[in-house]
Amino acid sequence: MASLHKNVALDLVELSAGRRPIGRKRLFKNKTNAEGKVEKYKAWLVAKRYSQVSAIDFGDIFSHVSKIASIRLILSIAIALILR
């Protein structure tokens, strides 16, 4: 929570009368290397979207951003398949 406040990524607001809080879920994942040793621990706190109502519970929707290295890889594979 301290990190979210420090990065101004979270606004705490009062819950409207007659509304229930949105459920949340914690996701954990370990990234391992080729030997099977843990390199990184990753964690997310996500909202259960199926209980949200657009324009009431949220205003913006964010999408994933692709890295340029991933796009280059996909394009090179496609070109290699075409030139076969």
Image (cartoon, rainbow, N blue to C red):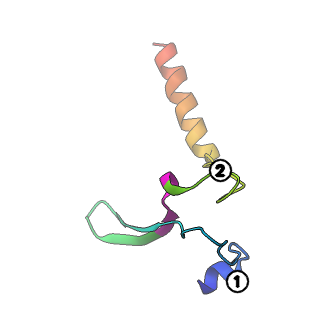
**Is residue 59 inside the magenta stretch?**
no
Q: Mark 2 points at which residue?
A: 54
Mark in the foreground, 1 or 2: 2
Quadrant of the frame with the C terminus: top left
User: x%, y% of residue 75?
Assistant: 57, 29
- The amino acid on which the numbered mark 2 sits, given as a three-letter code, is Ser
- The amino acid on which the numbered mark 1 sits, given as a three-letter code, is Lys
Residue at image location 60% in from the left, 69% down from the top: 18
**Label 2 Cα crowd, 10 Å radius (few <14 / some 14-19 / many 20+):** few
Q: Earlier in the sequence, mark 1 or mark 2?
A: 1
Residue at image location 59% in from the left, 67% down from the top: 19
Of residues 66 and 44, which is closer to you in this image? Answer: 44
Quadrant of the frame with the N terminus: bottom right
**Label 1 Cα crowd, 10 Å radius (few <14 / some 14-19 / many 20+):** few
**Residue at disc 1, secondary structure:** helix
In the image, residue 61 above or below residue 10:
above
User: x%, y% of residue 23?
Assistant: 47, 66
**Residue at disc 2, secondary structure:** loop
Of residues 44 and 75, which is closer to you in this image? Answer: 44
Taking the image as shown, residue 34 lies to the left or right of residue 59, namely left
Residue at image location 59% in from the left, 45% down from the top: 69
**Is residue 45 inside the magenta stretch?**
yes
In the image, residue 15 above or below residue 67:
below
Taking the image as shown, residue 26 lies to the left or right of residue 34, namely right
Tag on residue 15? none
User: x%, y% of residue 9?
Assistant: 69, 72
State which region is magenta.
44-50
Residue at image location 68% in from the left, 82% down from the top: 5
Tag on residue 6? 1
